[in-house]
């Protein structure tokens, strides 16, 4: 049981450690843990959105066609899950004095996104029975990094909107939720469609792997770029700050 639980949690913890250590001024551990648990709570919140949408016929629980894959991916997963994560991120960051650097948005969003991915992973891996090894490996390579990538983009636009306000590029506020939903929806649509058993399933699997490769590469570049900019801004602020150790001029 412990081995299965560790297999479910380890991918999320590794990715959290990766982004946390890119921060030149690391955030308090208690807030990272809090964000992680908020992400777990978001899995329940998302069902409060997806449940009514399913009852109203917006999507099918088991898609059997490409159109159903599309509606299930967006209305059954991307929209409710990303909205729930954004709510948790807002609750975590509102009136938070530690949210004082642009890179912080990525770190906190990652904690929420990976908390969601970790709890979801536990449900999938522990519910897969004898196939838990196969499920844990496939989700460690695709699903968990996927949630991480969606969270990084959400955190990036959240920070840009927060720190630049009316000076932020046009559409930044909308991109906080629209970009993660779009990426998540595309990911799930391809994943669902590749399992339909059609002649295109093999091709769609290759398309999914290519999409994930591009997504994860872009995410890594965004993290490294923002971490570098954050380091430069921190050095400028330190260099421009008055030196309290210098004697006062007479």
Image (cartoon, rainbow, N blue to C red):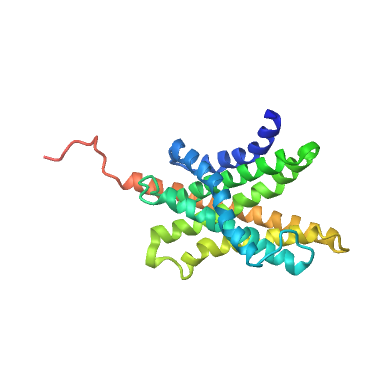
Q: Residue at x 48, y 47 (%)?
A: 108
Q: In this rendering, does residue 22 appear at all?
A: no
Residue 247 appears in which quarter of the rendering? top left
Q: Position of residue 76 (x, y in %)?
A: 65, 60
Q: How many marks?
A: 0
Q: In the image, is 102 to the left or to the right of 134?
A: left
Q: Residue at x 71, y 63 (%)?
A: 60
Q: Quadrant of the C terminus?
A: top left
Q: In the image, is 144 to the left or to the right of 174?
A: right
Q: In the image, is 126 to the left or to the right of 27?
A: right
Q: In this rendering, does residue 243 appear at all?
A: yes
| Residue situated in front as seen by the camera: 44 or 14 | 44
Q: Residue at x 16, y 38 (%)?
A: 248
Q: Position of residue 81 (x, y in %)?
A: 58, 55
Residue lying at the far front in this picture: please name it. Answer: 55
Q: Quadrant of the N terminus?
A: top right
- Relative to 8, say whether 74 is above or below: below
Residue lying at the far left in this picture: please name it. Answer: 250
Q: Residue at x 75, y 59 (%)?
A: 62
- Relative to 233, say whether 61 is above or below: below
Q: Position of residue 122 (x, y in %)?
A: 66, 40
Residue 65 appears in which quarter of the rendering? bottom right
């Amino acid at each position: 049981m412990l081995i299965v639980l560790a297999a479910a949690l380890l991918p999320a913890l590794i990715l959290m450690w990766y982004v946390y250590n890119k921060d030149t001024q690391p955030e308090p551990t208690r807030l990272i843990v809090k964000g992680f648990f908020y992400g777990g709570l978001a899995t329940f919140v998302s069902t409060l959105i997806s449940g009514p949408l399913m009852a109203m016929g917006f999507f099918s629980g088991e898609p059997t066609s490409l159109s159903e894959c599309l509606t299930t991916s967006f209305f059954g997963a991307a929209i409710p899950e990303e909205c729930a994560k954004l709510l948790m991120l807002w609750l975590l960051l509102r009136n938070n004095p530690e949210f004082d650097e642009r890179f912080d948005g990525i770190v906190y969003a990652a904690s929420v996104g990976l908390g969601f991915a970790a709890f979801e992973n536990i449900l999938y891996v522990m519910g897969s029975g004898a196939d838990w090894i196969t499920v844990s490996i496939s989700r460690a390579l695709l699903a968990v990094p996927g949630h991480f990538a969606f969270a990084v983009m959400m955190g990036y636009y959240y920070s840009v909107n927060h720190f630049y306000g009316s000076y932020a590029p046009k559409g930044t506020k909308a991109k906080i939720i629209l970009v993660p939903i779009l990426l998540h929806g595309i990911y799930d649509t391809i994943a669902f469609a590749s399992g339909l058993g059609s002649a295109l399933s093999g091709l769609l699997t290759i398309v999914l792997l290519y999409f994930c490769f591009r997504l994860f590469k872009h995410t890594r570049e965004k993290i490294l770029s923002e971490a570098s900019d954050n380091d430069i801004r921190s050095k400028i602020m330190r260099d421009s700050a008055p030196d309290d150790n210098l004697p006062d001029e007479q």
